[in-house]
Amino acid sequence: MYDRELMRAEARILVGLGMIGAGAAGLLAMNLWTLPAAIDVPCPEPPRCPPVTAAPALPAPSAPAPSAPSASAAPSASQAEPADAASDSSPPDGSESPEVQDAATSKSSDGTTFPEIRFPERSRAQSRELMDAVQPLAAYLRGHFNMRVVLVGHGDAGTSAPEYIQTGRMRAGAVLRTLVDFGVSASRITIEAPAVEAGRVVTRGVAPGTVQATVEPRFETTKGDADVP
């Protein structure tokens, strides 16, 4: 009895193994049949983007043509003034304008002019600016030993006549010392006060703070000496 049961168990095991083997064989056959078909399936191609085309350039907007001014916007002949009206300096009575006099305050009798010598307000001493202004005059005097210079100093505006004259004299003295520093002999330099009439200083158009320098011959030339070379 025991042997029969053992044989039945072995039979069942063999049947199971047989079924497992048949299943495995069927699965292998299925794989071998479907593998070539899977290999032959082409791979899908990647999507292609459409080619990029440049957008056509838009034409530049044209500037609007300027419109002609209307008749109401144009100035009338009575409102328009001539272009040269502002530059016309003739007197209204038709007389000729006076001639402009030589504004040079430092000049020689032979017509040579020199830079203006002017002091800042309340200034009376030597300075670098004074040396620069006096240097051309000094160079001329060093080259013309027969000439001398007369200095007339002017004070500041708004001061009394005595103070005006005193300040001008001190400024003329500063110019004298500067000329001496440049090698001009003090014997060739003279200081004079401005003219005074009725207790008032006569400036004759000379600006305050200016030192006039008038260069003239040192010696008077007689008629007989004029022919001597």
Image (cartoon, grey):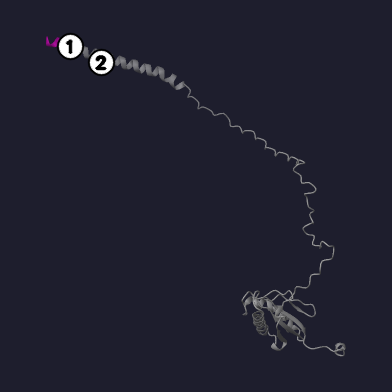
Asked which quadrant contains residue 208, the reply is bottom right
- Between 138 and 40, the one lying in front of the other is 138
Is 1 placed left or right of 192 in the picture? left
Depth check, front residue: 198 or 22: 198
Q: Amino acid at mark 2?
A: Leu
The residue labelled by disc 2 is 17
172 to the left or right of 31: right
- Element type where label 1 sits in the image: helix
Residue nearest the observer in this picture, 145 or 204: 204
Which residue corresponds to the image point at 24% horizontal and 12% vertical from the top-left?
15
| Image vertical order of residue 60 relative to residue 24, above or below | below
Q: In what element is the residue under mark 2?
A: helix
Q: Residue at the location (25% across, 14% down)? A: 16
- Which residue lies under the disc numbered 1? 7
| Residue 138 in view (yes/no) | no
* Within-10-Å neighbours for mark 1: few <14, some 14–19, many 20+: few
Q: Quadrant of residue 12?
A: top left
Specify the principal SS of the magenta part: helix
- Mark 2 vs mark 1, foreground winner is 2
From the image, which quarter does the N terminus lie in? top left
Magenta-colored span: 1-9
Disc 2 to disc 1, C-alpha distance: 15 Å
Please report the residue visible at 69 percent of the width from the left and 88 percent of the height from the top.
186
